Amino acid sequence: MKLEPLDIQPRLLLGPGPSPVPYPVRRALAEPVVGHMDPQFLAIVDHIQTMLRKVFGTANRLTLPVSGTGSAGMETAIVNFVEPGDTVIVVVAGVFGGRMVEAVEKVGGRVVCLEVPVGAAATLETLRQLLDDHPATRLVAVVMAETSTGVLQPLAGWGELVHSRDALLLVDTVTALGGMPVNVDDNGFDVVFSGTQKCLSAPPGLSPFTASDRALTHLDARKVPIPSWYLDLNAFRQYWGQNRVYHHTAPISMLYGLYEALRLVLLEGVESRYARHRQVAQALWAGLEAMDMELMVDTAIRLPSVTTVKVPHGVDEMRLRQYLLKHEGIEIAGGLQSLSGKIWRIGVMGHGARLSNMIELLAALGRGLRDQGRHVASGVEAAEAVYNRGNK
Ligand SMILES: *Cc1c(COP(=O)(O)O)cnc(C)c1O
């Protein structure tokens, strides 16, 4: 083996995560590693918590990044807030809802699935019906931004309804946080997790997490010990609270990266950032439609952060993605499970959500289709026109 130093070719990351990481965040990762009890570092820890509360839209005391990717946040939510025998309603509208079913079953929860057809969203009425049928429900788990289908689940009224049945509302905001309003407190979300590599544009490795005081009351009333040593929220509370008791070593450099990423979000302003995501996504949609491509999800519930587009009949899905990566340095993704081979997933996330990136992608898509003998109209002009309309 030759001991070559790393030499990574940059890519334009326009898939469903990781998203492009801007230079200030990458530079932050290279700052000197200090101890996790160093006063310099503890100040950063405090600032991260304050910034996370702003981006989540919450005053929750328990707001912190879990060490691990988004899935670690999911597992933290479930091992702490589900006990054996608890009835848990899980909305399954795609792959990420399906994962929560598995995680709840692993800790002995009794899952009631609220199954939603691919490309659709659940309704408040269906949830109400299910809660009527299962009055002992302790927790309702739902994905706000289903990355596998590109659907934005409307959640207005969910918090109120779930609370009226004395249950908790758990929300996966992995592909939402930093790209669209999450508003934890206004929406009555109790347990919320996210990830750093989607709309926050930091590298993968941390899972922003928050839990309401209501949720903590449920946690304190647990009858059975938390079935995880590492993901024990009571232990996290010791370090991220006032006591600073060592549990596991904080991932120092990753936290530098998150600090910088959150700082950039707040410098831009959350409202401007959400508007930018929306405007750039709309430009992409117009461009794709001008190229005669069909979008999978209705506008009313279409996610700004992930666009799902149907693979035109007769086009080799994988070959097109390989073309983009090899010849254009652009990464997009295919479909998962039942959608495999049928759709592409395009991320409009964080630092990547810019018109210039969409123009580059639309032009490259045209070349990729031509490579397969398909000649389509350009999507560039339509994308620019829609984007400029948004600027007026
Ligand atoms: C990416 C993603 C996850 C999983 O996050 P990892 O960082 O890959 O562990 C969970 N839920 C949704 C909606 C996601 O998009």
Image: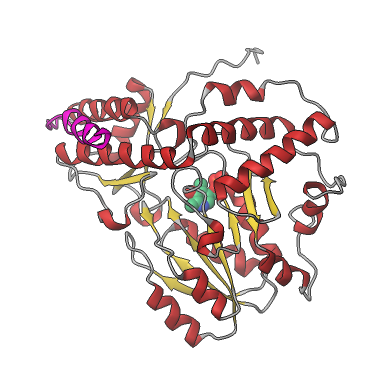
Residue 170 makes an appearance in the image:
yes
Q: Position of residue 226 (x, y in %)?
A: 77, 65
Identity of the residue drawn at 85% across and 31% down: 38
Question: In this image, 307 relative to 379: left or right?
Answer: right
Most common secondary structure along the magenta stretch? helix
Q: How is the image coloured?
A: secondary structure
Residue 35, quarter of picture:
top right
Question: In this image, 237 relative to 372: left or right?
Answer: right
Span highlighted in magenta in the image = 373-392
Q: Position of residue 282 (x, y in %)?
A: 27, 41
Q: Relative to 307, is 350 above or below?
A: above
Query: Which quadrant holds the N terminus?
Result: top right
Residue 100, quarter of picture:
bottom right
Q: Relative to 123, is 263 above or below?
A: above
Residue 232 makes an appearance in the image:
no
Q: Position of residue 125 (x, y in %)?
A: 38, 77
Identity of the residue drawn at 52% across and 61% down: 186
Q: Is residue 379 magenta?
A: yes
Query: Which quadrant holds the C terminus?
Result: top left
Q: Position of residue 251 (x, y in %)?
A: 73, 36
Identity of the residue drawn at 56% across and 60% down: 185
Identity of the residue drawn at 32% across and 52% down: 302
Q: Is residue 152 magenta?
A: no
Q: Nearer the viewer, residue 369 or 45?
A: 45
